[in-house]
Amino acid sequence: MHDIESQTMRKVLRRFVPLLIICFVVSFLDRVNVGFAALTMSKDLGFSSTVFGLGSGLFFIGYFFFEVPSNLALERIGARRWIARIMLTWGVLSAANAFVVGERSFYLVRILLGMAEAGFFPGVILFMTWWIPASYRGRVIGAFMAAMPFASVIGGPISGWLLGTNGVLGLKGWQLLFVTEALPSLALAVVVLKMLRDRPADAEWLDEDERRWLAQRLDADGRAASAVTEKGFWNIAKRPMVMVLAAAYFGIVGSNFGLSFFLPQIVHAFKLSFVQTGFVTAIPFAVGGFGMMWWGRRSDRRDERRFHLLLPMGLAVTGLAGSTFAPWPPLELALLCVGCFGVYSTLPVFWSTVSRLLSPAVAAVGFAVINSLANLSGFAAPYLIGAIKDATGSTAGGLQAIAAYGCLTFVLLAGIGRYEATHGARLRAGGKRVVGVGEAGG
């Protein structure tokens, strides 16, 4: 059995994980590259920090309203075709950022981009529950979500260089940035259509005994997805545990996007060139990326979630708040690295915990509800930071506000981690999940 497990998982992980990571790198870069573009775009178009923060955050309004319908469509149509569709439309709309001419067109394109990308992240998490056994999921989700910081590691230097290429193809640097960084998603849509398969039964590249082993293992984990009715949706959406998970994730996501959209401006204030800003901005995200992969594996190896949720969240609060009081740039950068490590290391452990608390009947909608509600912080955090920056001339107050909500997030994660630990033995034994329709929580 060990040989079957090793060879099956080797094939599954090699086929899907690198491709999905690359897709998420492109997705996240297309989402946050507006943070780099703002270094010249805001001046060219006359945007205040409030306008920039609002426009950046409006992405998540479109995302919010279309996330659950998108995830339900993925379950009905299949991951292969639906994820390819998502990537195609977000590529087109990401490039459209290059042609905005004022506040209204900026707001419109950001909303439409959010609508186009809605469902990608929770859809991939759901896809993983169809393919990845629970004992592998923490490390796989960690590697997948490392795409977020590594998108900034890769995109930072590239974006900084593109900003200085005014005049190429008649475009300004920020326009060329949007067009160039949208192209990979269009190409990857074709690759996704060719490579993904909706279920293990469709995997012609697995032997019969490998397909059988994988199906049995997933069934034992209780992760085989089931269709969700409209009545089931409302039952799921109002569950107290789902709301608690969404509230906790709201704080994690808010910290993430507050950094992602404004870190280029924070670093550029160190009096660096665009290219230097790109490379220095990559440092905190690199720390966060390596941290989340290591921390996710550590949580899997020890089969422990609570401590692995609380320590990084505590570091996130400490790093973000502490950076605003740092008297000189190297110390500020070091504390931002601590904050990035904390924020990104919390993410894979959180989603691994969620996947153990939601029943198969809840998974498709549950993931999307949690993600879409929490991603509203992607609207709130940039707008808050931008408004406070216009009022005070500094991003410090905005980062302090995000860190304050992080304290509440810490308390929520403590309760979630304790709940998972209390019911862990039953979950690992494949017993009834704690938040299924008609189960605990309502």
Image (tube, rainbow, N blue to C red):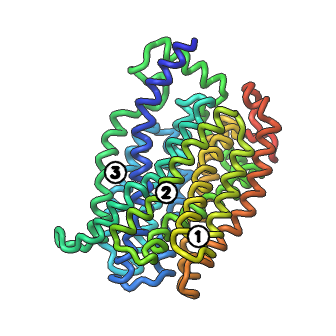
Q: Do the residues labelled 1 and 3 touch (CB within 8 Å)?
A: no
Give residue 135's position: percent from left, percent from top.
62, 29
Q: Are marks 3 and 2 in contact (CB under 8 Å)?
A: no
- Nearer to us in this view, 177 or 85: 177
> From mark 2 to mark 1, how far is it between C-alphas?
18 Å
Q: Of label 3 and label 2, which has the lower sequence position?
A: 3
- Nearer to us in this view, 299 or 418: 299
> 60 above or below 228?
below
Give residue 354's position: percent from left, percent from top.
67, 43
Circle 3 residue:
185
Where residue 394 sits, quadrant-wise, is: bottom right
Mark carried by residue 381: 1
Q: Which amino acid does label 1 sit on?
A: Ala
Q: What residue type is labelled 2?
A: Phe
Q: Which amino acid does label 3 sit on?
A: Ser
Horizontal placement of 364 versus 168: left or right?
A: right
Closer to us: mark 3 or mark 2?
2
> From mark 3 to mark 2, how far is it between C-alphas?
21 Å
- Nearer to us in this view, 45 or 224: 45
Closer to us: mark 2 or mark 1?
2
Circle 2 residue:
285
Residue sitting at 66 percent across and 28 percent down? 222
Residue sitting at 46 percent across and 67 percent down? 111
Can see residue 4? yes
Residue sitting at 32 percent across and 39 percent down? 191
